Structures are given as C-alpha cells and as structure tokens.
Image (spheres, rainbow, N blue to C red):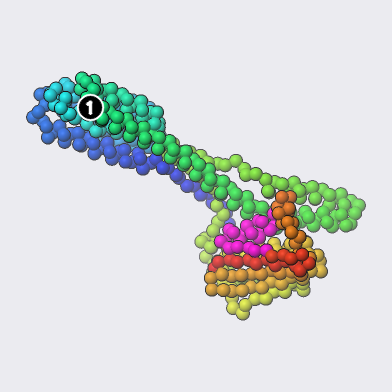
C-alpha cells in the first residue's frame, strides 16, 4: 500500500488578518456615522464628504490587500498610511477650530488605527513604531498643540501597535519551531519504521552470512568478512542522525509541514479484524511451544501485524543469542481491553547493561523491532532477564 504525503498548514497570524479586515470596515462605517451625526457643525462639510467618499471606496477596494501577508505589500501600506494621514490633516479644513481643540474626532477617526495595525502584523513592532509615530505627529499638527488628550491618544496607539507587532513576531517564531518539531517527529517515525524492516531482513541476513562464512573458511570467510563490514555500515546508517527537515513556509497561509505518513491499514483496509493466533501459529516449531486461547483473538490489522512482527523479532533474538538448542514458549492472554503476548526462553539470559551497549553499537533489535513497534500501536514491551535463567519479553497491545 502506497504512502501518502500529509500537508499541514499552520498560521497563527491568519486570524489577525481576518480581524483587521473586519475592523477596517466597521471603523469606516463608524467614521461616516460620526460625520453624519455632526453634519450641521461642520463649516465646510463638502471637504469631509469628499474624503469620506474616498475612504469608503478605498476601504472596500483594498479588502483583498489585508487578507494575508503576501497581499499586503509595502506599496499598499504606504498608500494606506497616506490616506490616514491625509484625513487627519484635512480635519482642520473641514471642521471648526473650536471642535478640534475641545477633543473632536478627526475625519478618519479610529480607522487610522487599522492602518497602523496593518504595519504591525506585516512587519512587526519596528514597522508599527514607525507608522504610529507618523500618525502621532499628524494628530499634533492638526490640533496645533500637544494637549493632554492628544498625548494620551497618541501613546495609546503607539504602545498598542508595538505590542501587537511584538506578539506577531513571537507567534511567527513559535510557529516555525512547532513546524520543525512536527517535521522531526514525522521523520523520526519514518526512520524507525525503515530501521525495523531493515533489522528484520537485511541485517539478519548479513549477520548470518558473516557467521557461516567464518565457520566455513576459505573464500567463504572473505565473503563473511565483507558481509560483516556491510552490516556495520548499514547499522551506522540506520542509527545515524536525522536527514534534513523539509519545513517550508507559505507567505500566504503560514508554515507548511510536509510529512510522509505510513498508511493506516486499520482505516484504509476493508478487511475484518485479524486473528492474532493465525499470525503467530507459523512460529511454532519443535523448539517453540505456542499456547493460545480457545477463541479468536481479534485485533485491527495494523495492530495484529506489528504485534506478530515484534514476536518474530523476539524469537530471532532467541535463536541468535540463546543458541541452537534453546527452547522458547509463546503465550497469548486475551483480556477485555488488552492482548498480552509473552515470549520466554531458557537461554543464558542477558548480562546487565548488554542492551544499552547494543544500542550504542547500532544494534537496535530490541529498541526498534520490539519496543518501537509496540510504541507505535500504543502498547508497551517489557523485557525481564536473569543471567542463567533465560529471558522473558512481555508485549501488551490495546484492542
């Protein structure tokens, strides 16, 4: 069954662009409403009407520009800020001086903050500081003096925009970090899966060729030596570092994480649950005793396959390390929520610290072929070994 590439799109700032679009429309309507409610107080209302008409058309026409980071270009930001500053500086032309000095709103009113917020979301806190400073200067110029109310409003916009810009920068960094972590996790799972398959086939064949060649001598010994070298090289490759990650970014929608998923056989296969007994029966030989329940032990296909493969890996370890004369026993216990498979042998056992040493040498049979498989299906693998009394591997898999 072919693997599939899973693409996850992550963007923590996209909701901010949507909120900005709504904010611009609402504040545009608010600015028009303020003018209509105070129409009679404007000595030159035609100036306000002309500007608000431009503001209305500009706001609606530029909604696609504030839909995402890619569309919000530097040229648009400059033009948008120019509209806001023009509206502020036109306020003394349209409105009376008395209304302005007593705290009357500018023509664009709080719509101006939307322009500053666009700078913050697009470029971070430095861009926000630049835009809010220009807006503050324009407010001081149109009022003719730096009053307490003007200073309060300017500082409010300045601090808020810088704070939002900083939050956006932190969010982008966190987004990239999370994308990297997910990519590493997916790559690690794929490497472990490949390592298990290699251990179950190629590495075991190479090890067998090395042993048989050394025993036969002559040309076969040279072949065994070469097989041993290739086994060491392959183990080093399997247990080596991670390949380069493929985290990418999409300026429109945020970070992309591409990961190769193993096909979920339990979801994609239409076959009925598998009977674990049928998968483990072939392991029964003259030296391997198999004990099973009287009723079928049904598991999802993927769980049954991985559990049977882990049992096979445990038996391979018995044959390789406990000797040709060692006996083994397989026992299946079918509990309500869990299936327990125990593999026990009467070999010499595993010396203390040997497993850690094997992992350091790149021999990942227990770590990947047994524990790795059980971890992937949500189960556990416990290994108990007493020198001179054999080894017992207990595999627990959820139903």
What span is in magenta?
362-383
Task: Determine the residue positioned at 13% across, 33% down.
Answer: 36
> Residue 44: percent from the left, percent from the top?
12, 23
What residue is rendered at 56% in x and 49% in y? 186
| Residue 206 place in picture, x, y as percent | 77, 54
Q: Which residue is mark 1?
A: 148
Taking the image as drawn, is residue 16 in sight?
yes
Residue at 46%, 42% (x, y): give it: 175
Q: Would residue 147 appear left or right of 335 to someone viewing this image? A: left
**Magenta stretch: includes residue 121:** no
Q: Residue at x 54, y 68 (%)?
A: 399
State the image coordinates of residue 147 (x, y, percent, origin top left): 22, 24
Q: Which quadrant: the N terminus?
A: bottom right
Report whether residue 89 is seen: no
Identity of the residue furthest to the front in this view: 148
List the single residue furthest toward the left: 40
How many other residues sit within 10 Å of disc 1, few (<14), some (14-19) or many (≥20)? few
Secondary structure under badge 1?
A: helix
Who is closer to the viewer here, 197 or 156?
Answer: 156
Q: Is residue 330 above or below residue 377?
A: below
Q: In the image as oriented, which residue stretches furthest toward the bottom?
A: 294
């Amino acid at each position: 069954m072919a693997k599939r590439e899973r693409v996850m799109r992550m963007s923590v700032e996209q909701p901010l662009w949507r909120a900005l679009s709504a904010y611009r429309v609402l504040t545009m309507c608010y600015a028009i409403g303020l003018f209509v409610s105070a129409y009679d107080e404007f000595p030159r209302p035609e100036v306000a009407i002309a500007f608000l008409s431009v503001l209305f058309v500009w706001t609606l026409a530029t909604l696609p520009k504030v839909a995402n980071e890619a569309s919000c270009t530097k040229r648009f930001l400059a033009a948008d800020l120019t509209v806001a500053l023009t509206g502020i500086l036109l306020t003394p032309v349209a409105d009376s001086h008395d209304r302005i000095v007593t705290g009357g709103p500018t023509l664009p009113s709080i719509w101006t903050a939307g322009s500053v917020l666009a700078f913050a979301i697009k470029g971070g806190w430095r861009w926000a500081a630049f835009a809010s400073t220009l807006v503050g200067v324009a407010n001081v110029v149109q009022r003719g003096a730096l009053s307490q109310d003007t200073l309060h409003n300017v500082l409010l916009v300045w601090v808020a925009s810088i704070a939002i810009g900083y939050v956006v920068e932190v969010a982008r960094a966190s987004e990239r970090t999370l994308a990297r972590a997910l990519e590493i996790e997916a790559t690690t799972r794929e490497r472990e899966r490949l390592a298990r398959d290699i251990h179950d086939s190629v590495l075991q064949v190479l090890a067998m060729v090395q042993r048989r060649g050394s025993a036969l001598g002559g040309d076969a010994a040279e072949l065994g030596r070469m097989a041993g070298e290739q086994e060491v090289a392959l183990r080093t490759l399997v247990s080596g570092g991670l390949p380069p990650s493929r985290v990418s970014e999409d300026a429109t929608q945020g970070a992309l994480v591409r990961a190769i998923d193993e096909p979920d056989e339990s979801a994609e296969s239409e076959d009925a649950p598998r009977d674990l007994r049928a998968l483990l029966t072939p392991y029964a030989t003259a030296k391997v005793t198999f004990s099973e329940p009287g009723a079928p032990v049904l598991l999802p296909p993927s769980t049954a396959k991985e559990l049977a493969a882990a049992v096979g890996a445990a038996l391979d370890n018995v044959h390789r390390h406990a000797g040709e004369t060692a006996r083994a026993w397989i026992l299946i216990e079918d509990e309500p929520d869990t299936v327990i498979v125990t593999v026990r042998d009467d070999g010499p056992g595993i010396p203390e610290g040997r497993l850690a040493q094997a992992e350091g040498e790149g021999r990942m049979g227990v770590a990947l072929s047994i524990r790795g498989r059980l971890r992937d299906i949500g189960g556990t693998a416990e290994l108990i070994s007493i020198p001179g009394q054999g080894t017992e591997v207990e595999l627990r898999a959820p139903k």
